[in-house]
Image (cartoon, coloured by chain):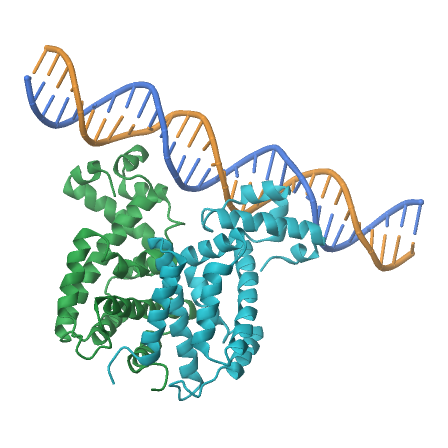
Chain colours: A cyan, B green, C blue, D orange
DNA sequence: ATTGACAAGTGACATTGTGTCATATAGTAT
DNA sequence: ATACTATATGACACAATGTCACTTGTCAAT
């Protein structure tokens, strides 16, 4: 977590700094991002940076968490829209992520995060069950999911299902990036995979 | 790829260098690994390193590919042992990976790779279909897989299934590492996930 | 208004690491 | 012996990180 000093900063200074950091993390993966670039763009001295953050990692985590929070809120909206059908909701989330993210910078930030800090993101869903505020988030989601057509016998199964579809969505995105698939191609593959998971890969 | 010079090296010098590199990449994730440490441990001058490799990334890729090749060969063995049941074979592969990897260094190398170069590994299976030598590997595998109980209508579906179970295995490992689960706990979760995928997450 | 105490700001600096290059050395074919 | 090519080497230029001693700002108590 950033230090208190960071949160005490006047609004506009904090915004500028965040904006500069987002630019840098959109430009290159986190491990290549340079603090020097960030402070130059934000116009703050080197020492100040270390007043606000432990290090680059600390800043990156903060930004990533912010973004993921937004995504989670959005996912809840979609879950409602799809009447609790978790796979449909995820498909629209993914579609939106691929083709409707309007901001190039946002897109690249998330792409760099997914490719090079995947461990953090992949567990974004899992983390829900540890942190306190996210326990509430999971409960929200659990309420919304329609389990009547799902093959689950308890809450644990539900968690596993969320993990499975997240893992596949995630993998699909990595595949898209590496093979440079079009949005359409990636979406096709994703849909087929989801169908396989829904009906089961083994014959009954 | 390493430069020809590297392959021209006398056996023992090359071994020493590889050993030093593996140690370093087992110690820390690739982006924190230091060339300085590697050359110090290997006892070669700085300039020589750049005779052999483009950069750290080049060396890391080379080592990773070597390791993955070994894993692939092992997977084929298991596929035979399990009479073409791809899920059973993967479960044993995963089990072996968790509890029977004897070498602490090997284990850490792969762990660092999986956590911080996941994009490379996740596509290890996918890559099979691009590179030439790996096309042969996929054909080998395809021959061995028993598709009679699988819900596949063509080769494409089979590829997707391989991707799905790889993605889930991969995610499971990341989860284990981050939440520090025991081998046993991780294995339990994995088995349940595989069963969900086999029978389908939706009621028929 | 002055003081003191604590919070925040600052940039020079030590340290560590990277990739390059000019030069030295070894190997080989003629 | 010569010329040509491949390899070896470490000093160096450059870039980045994290720290620290010092400065500046804020604000409550007197």
> x%, y% of residue A35?
54, 45
Whether residue B172 appears in this view of the structure is no
- Percent coordinates x, y for residue B187 in the rendering: 31, 76
**Toward the viewer: B7 or B26?**
B7
Tell me the residue at 31%/41% (across/down).
Answer: B39
Tell me residue B203's x, y (percent): 36, 86
The residue shown at (13%, 69%) is B144
**Viewer-closest of A52 and A13:** A13
Labels in figure, total? 0
Query: Given the current orientation, which residue lies at the most extreme front position?
Result: A184
From the image, which quarter does the C terminus of chain B lie in?
A: bottom left
Q: Quadrant of residue B50?
A: top left
Across and down, in percent, residue A134 comes to 55, 74
Residue at image location 57% in from the left, 45% down from the top: A38
Tell me: residue A91, above or below residue A46: below
Above or below, comparing residue B191 to residue B1 in the picture: below
Q: Nearer the viewer, residue B111 or A115?
A: A115
Does C8 sit above or below residue A188?
above
The quadrant of the rendering that contains the N terminus of chain B is top left
Residue B167 seen in the figure = yes
């Amino acid at each position: 977590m950033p230090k208190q000093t960071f949160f005490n900063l006047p609004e506009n200074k904090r915004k500028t700094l965040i904006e500069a950091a987002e630019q840098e993390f959109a430009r290159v993966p986190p491990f290549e991002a340079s603090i020097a670039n960030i402070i130059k763009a934000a116009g703050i001295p080197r020492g100040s940076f270390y007043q606000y953050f432990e290090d680059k990692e600390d800043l990156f985590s903060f930004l990533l968490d912010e973004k993921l929070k937004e995504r989670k809120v959005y996912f809840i909206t979609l879950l409602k829209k799809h009447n609790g059908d978790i796979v449909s909701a995820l498909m629209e989330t993914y579609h939106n992520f691929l083709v409707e993210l309007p901001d190039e910078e946002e897109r690249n930030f998330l792409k760099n995060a997914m490719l090079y800090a995947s461990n953090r993101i992949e567990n974004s869903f899992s983390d829900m069950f540890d942190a306190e505020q996210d326990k509430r988030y999971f409960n929200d989601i659990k309420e919304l999911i329609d389990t009547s057509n799902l093959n689950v016998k308890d809450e644990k199964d539900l968690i596993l299902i969320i993990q499975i579809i997240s893992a596949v969505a995630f993998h699909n995105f990595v595949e898209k990036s590496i093979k440079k698939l079009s949005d359409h191609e990636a979406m096709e593959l994703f849909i087929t995979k989801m169908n396989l998971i829904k009906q089961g890969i083994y014959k009954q």
